[in-house]
Image (cartoon, rainbow, N blue to C red):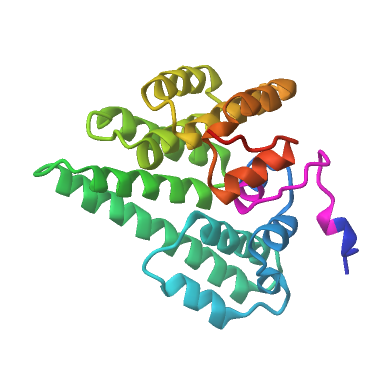
Amino acid sequence: MENFRNLFITKTGFIPRTQAQALTAYMEDIIGPEYYVYRAVNVHPLLEEPWDFQEIDRLLAKNELDIDTITILVTIFDKMLQLPDKEQALFAAESINALEQRYLSIIVSMLKKLETEETSESVRTIMQAYLSLAAISKKRPLLRTFYLGEAKATFKKYRHILTDPEKDIAVFIKILFDLNQLAEARKEIMLSIERYPKNTTLHLLAAEYNFKIGSFRSIGNYLNKISRLFRDSKDTELLKFWGIGVQNE
């Protein structure tokens, strides 16, 4: 059996401190699947063999799956596909196909609905479906990039009704990050912060941009300047990580 400790060695020394950080690190291949599941969602027994097919079926039967759950399931299915057990490999292949068909059907249905009525919720559902397909396609880079590109194109087509800084703009910026289109992401962040100067999510994305371009010193300086905006406990924990105390207005 593979040494347990070796499962939790990251390639860069980066230790994720939140579920979001762990998911991002896993999607960018900084940490392995075992480390991601153990660190982020505390359901590592699902990775142990023999797998709990009843629990997997329960998750697959849910009407809505978040990106984290999809990532966990696909990690398990990828492992099954590498095994000589043909029955398990077939189950994994069929399950991945079922997930893909689920989200493709959602996209078709929502696109048809948009023909008669443009609503932000319908567009968000389509974008989320594309992001789910991108998560399913983690091991297929070209297909993952295609789905991310479709999510981006959907936002740009309907951005006149996608104005919420949390539900829409932040999601779009994260898509640009995933596509490694950092110049466009920087422009979007600057315009969005100018429009919503007190939105902490956008400011955190600005800090993340600095992280992605390797400007690490800028992150602490930037967060220190806008620390007075943070009130949420999760955000203040991030500030503490960078050695910044929360200021009172």
* Image location of residue 195, percent across then percent down: 36, 23
**Quadrant where the image shows the N terminus:** bottom right
As drawn, 1 above or below 55: above
Q: Position of residue 126 (x, y in %)?
A: 31, 46
Counting from the top left corner in percent of width and height, residue 88 is at 61, 73
Depicted 122 relative to depicted 197: above or below: below
Q: Is residue 123 left or right of residue 167?
A: left
> Does residue 50 appear in the picture of this structure?
yes
In the image, residue 159 lies in the stretch drawn in magenta: no
Left or right: 242, with 119 as reference point: right
Counting from the top left corner in percent of width and height, residue 196 is at 39, 27
**Camera sees residue 212:** no
Quadrant hosting residue 97: bottom left
Q: Is residue 212 above or below residue 107?
A: above
Q: Quadrant of residue 40?
A: bottom right
Give left or right: position of 111 versus 216. left
Quadrant hosting residue 33: bottom right
- Image point 49% across, 40% down: which residue? 143
Q: Nearer the viewer, residue 136 or 234?
A: 234
**Left or right: where 83 falls relative to 124:** right
Magenta part of the chain? 7-23
Please tell me which residue lies in front, 98 or 189. 189
Q: Residue at x 34, y 30 (%)?
A: 153
